[in-house]
Amino acid sequence: MIEFTMPSLGADMEAGTLSEWLVKAGDKVKRGDIIAVVDTQKGLIDIEVFDEGVIQKLVTKEGEKVPVGSVLALILSDKEQGNVKEEKPEISPIIEAKATEKVAVVPPARIKASPLAKKIASDQGIDLTNIKGTGEEGVITKEDVEKAIAAKEKPQEVKRAASSETIRMAIAAAMSKSNKEIPHYYLQTKIDMRNSLNWLSEANKQRSLKNRLLPVALLLKATAKALTIVPDLNAYWENGLQRKADINIGFVISLRGGGLMIPAIHDGAKKSVDEIMATLSDIIPRARVMKLRSSELSDSTITVTNLGEGSVETVFGVIYPPQVAIVGFGNISEQPWAENGMLDVRPVLSVTLAADHRATDGHIGSRFLTELNNILQNPEAI
Amino acid sequence: MTEQEIRQLIFQLLKKIAPDTEPEKLQPDDDIRHTLEIDSFDYLQFIVAIDEQLELDIPEEDYGKIDTVKNMTNYIISKKTKKV
């Protein structure tokens, strides 16, 4: 039997509330299916399953808050189903019980409501069966429906406001832990972006408006490529250095109402610049409305923060544990640039690296920034 | 399309991208991106939306000509009249 547990969606998460089950006992699930929605400090997160099989039992009830690692459901794997045939009948009563439950709900009791109340309710998607009428003989009035609408809207508003605040608290908790436990070291370099920007501008001439590339897509690709050469920075610090095979870059997205989301761009090294741009177009809007998948919040192996949108030249990041490095990109601005005894004006990018001194030292950090620079000087080879 | 209608469309599309802002309060010469704090990703979505509404593919080298509401309105008028 496989235990499907409350996932940890970052170092700062201790517990989550099971908001909604999207499956029931007896349902078949496969790897990558979203089977539950969990309410965390970072909002409502879709939780994926990483095994194949049949849901045997939902252990945690909707609305229950449980610590990370608690069993949420039991899944009977495909293999087990073949071997242990007698377990199968156990599932059927659950399915049947569920089915009867549903059937019982189908014939609705006659609802007494005024025609206006009925119209408003149907327009607003309000279920009249849940409303207690205050009119004559318990008839549901227009006022009753309006109250129900107000009640329905209110909790959502409260949730939103709480979310922005709880995100801030979650970030604070993770960053306090980071500053307390991780001995950071910081490096900075300046990169001449002329070649890269020229390459982007040429590349964009061949692309339709919708498929145009932003400089950040190239920067993310270059980061992933540099990490393949300097893999010690793509790692976790958990009882020592644990290098990660996949390069999943956590990309910091600031929310308009305050707070951050850091979804992972999976397999950055294997994606082309266009594919990274397409991934950004997919995750940025979802991050803004806090609609991310659990794997996107838990799989990052390094973080990139791109504060280059305003006038900030340099950003020094705080490492997101258990990761061991964070790369910071400032804005690209025209600056005097001396090269081969000549002075010129170039678009210049300030890049920083904050890394964990337990995992690496400045020499490795410096190699990473040097490789990043080399890659950005030859964007056509990316 | 009149100048007024173009301005309204710009405000409407900006509001869609940055719902918490008030684009209609933009002064004609305010820098759109800085004033509304729109990042490059959202700005690209805005330019895509303009294209979808007006069939106007704004090349990258013209981004500097559409930084304010006034400039953008003039740019759209000049492009649309040229087409006709």
Image: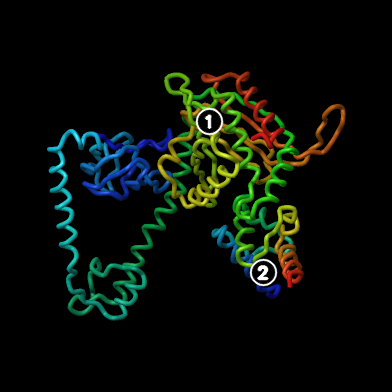
Residue in the foreground of this view, choosing between B79 and A138: B79
Drawn side of residue A180 relative to residue A195, left or right: left
- Taking the spot 27% from the left edge, 45% from the top edge, the residue there is A28
Q: Is residue A31 above or below residue A206?
A: above
In the rendered image, the quadrant that contains the C terminus of chain A is: top right
In the rendered image, the quadrant that contains the N terminus of chain A is: top left
Whole-percent x, y for residue A346 in the image: 79, 38
Are the numbered discs 2 and 1 placed on the same chain, yes or no? no
Which amino acid lies under the numbered mark 1 shown in the image of this protein? Answer: Ile
Q: Residues within 10 Å of mark 1 (few under 14, many from 20)?
A: many
Whole-percent x, y for residue B24 in the image: 63, 66
The label number, if any, that marks residue A132 in the structure image:
none
- Taking the spot 44% from the left edge, 46% from the top edge, the residue there is A292
User: Would you name the residue on which mark 1 appears?
Assistant: A319
What's the chain of the residue with tag 2? B
- Taking the spot 47% from the left edge, 30% from the top edge, the residue there is A321
Residue in the foreground of this view, choosing between A207 and A336: A207
Whole-percent x, y for residue A4 in the image: 29, 37
User: Would you name the residue on which mark 2 appears?
Assistant: B7
Drawn side of residue A309 relative to residue A53, left or right: right
Spatial distance from mark 2 to mark 1, Cα to Cα?
44 Å
Q: Residues within 10 Å of mark 2 (few under 14, many from 20)?
A: some
